[in-house]
Image: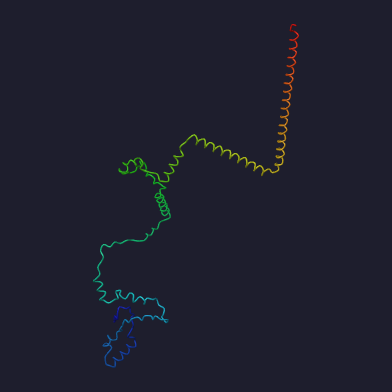
């Protein structure tokens, strides 16, 4: 038999050990009563006694701390509480109607194979790019048919959107405007491009010559003195030829001047002879 001593959790304690039972059996024999008469009295009796709480001192034994929650949850009614309290709670209970339940948290991803996971990641990346305006959704294609799009009549009737149902993304529109601006060709732009191309060609030729000279110098270092001697010889020959040409020009100039002087002298002589003849032939 179990006795309820209160709402505080209790520990069942055996209050009728085996020694007590034997003592009662011996007493019943002395009284003249048989074991059948004392059968019910010899049954074990249990009694719930409150569990001793730990003392709050230095000698307190280490435990889980569950006893500290007794005072805090003393007003909580459970199935182990008094029947009156349990019955009162059951009578006062009113079920809630039209409860709005909200699911919070993140959905657990479904386990996918490697192929499905890769395709799912690609679709997520494409959707993100479409939201940012970097990628257009391709037009649907029907095998052996005609691709078309459904457009509402209101959108089609607007003058601003008529004939331009599909628009390019913002980045592509900006790039298209830049291409239109650069596509305007003028005479000045053509000449400028030709000059730049000529400069690039000259720079490339100079770079090739420089690389060829550097390669020859590295490949044939012994030919350098011979080339220097040839260069000095060529320079000397050029200077000599120039000096000879100058000397020949001076000689030719002097000869011309001498011939001109002789011609003037000859003319003066002829003029003098002619005047003398005229004076002699004149009548006295």
Q: Nearer the viewer, residue 117 or 284?
A: 284
| Lateral position of residue 120 relative to residue 38, left or right | right
Q: Position of residue 147 (x, y in %)?
A: 36, 42
Q: Position of residue 234 (x, y in %)?
A: 71, 35
The C terminus: image quadrant: top right
Q: Residue furthest front?
A: 284
Q: Position of residue 30 (x, y in %)?
A: 29, 93
For the rendered model, the colour scheme is rainbow
| Lateral position of residue 112 relative to residue 259, left or right | left
Residue 18 sits in quarter:
bottom left
The N terminus: image quadrant: bottom left
Q: Nearer the viewer, residue 63 or 175?
A: 175
Residue 3 sits in quarter:
bottom left
| Lateral position of residue 112 relative to residue 46, left or right | right
Q: Position of residue 44 (x, y in %)?
A: 31, 84
Residue 240 sits in quarter:
top right
């Amino acid at each position: 038999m179990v006795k309820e001593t209160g709402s505080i959790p209790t520990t069942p304690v055996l209050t009728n050990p085996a020694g007590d039972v034997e003592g009662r059996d011996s007493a019943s024999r002395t009284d003249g009563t048989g074991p059948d008469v004392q059968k019910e009295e010899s049954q074990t009796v249990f009694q719930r006694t409150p569990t001793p709480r730990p003392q709050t001192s230095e000698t307190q034994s280490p435990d889980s701390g569950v006893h500290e929650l007794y005072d805090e949850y003393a007003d909580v009614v459970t199935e182990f509480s008094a029947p009156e309290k349990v019955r009162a709670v059951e009578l006062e209970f009113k079920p809630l109607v039209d409860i709005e339940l909200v699911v919070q948290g993140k959905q657990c991803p479904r386990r996918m194979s490697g192929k499905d996971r890769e395709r799912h990641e690609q679709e997520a990346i494409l959707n993100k790019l479409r939201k940012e305006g970097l990628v257009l959704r391709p037009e649907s294609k029907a095998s052996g048919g005609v691709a078309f799009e459904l457009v509402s009549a209101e959108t089609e009737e607007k003058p601003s959107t008529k004939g331009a149902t599909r628009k390019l993304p913002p980045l592509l529109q900006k790039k298209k405007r830049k291409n239109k601006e650069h596509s305007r060709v003028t005479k000045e732009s053509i000449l400028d491009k030709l000059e730049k191309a000529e400069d690039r060609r000259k720079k490339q030729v100079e770079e090739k010559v420089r690389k060829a000279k550097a390669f020859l110098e590295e490949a044939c270092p012994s030919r350098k003195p011979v080339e220097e001697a040839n260069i000095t010889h060529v320079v000397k020959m050029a200077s000599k030829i120039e000096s000879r040409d100058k000397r020949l020009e001076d000689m030719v100039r002097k000869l011309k001047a001498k011939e001109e002087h002789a011609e003037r002298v000859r003319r003066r002589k002829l003029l003098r002879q002619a005047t003398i003849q005229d004076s002699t032939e004149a009548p006295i």
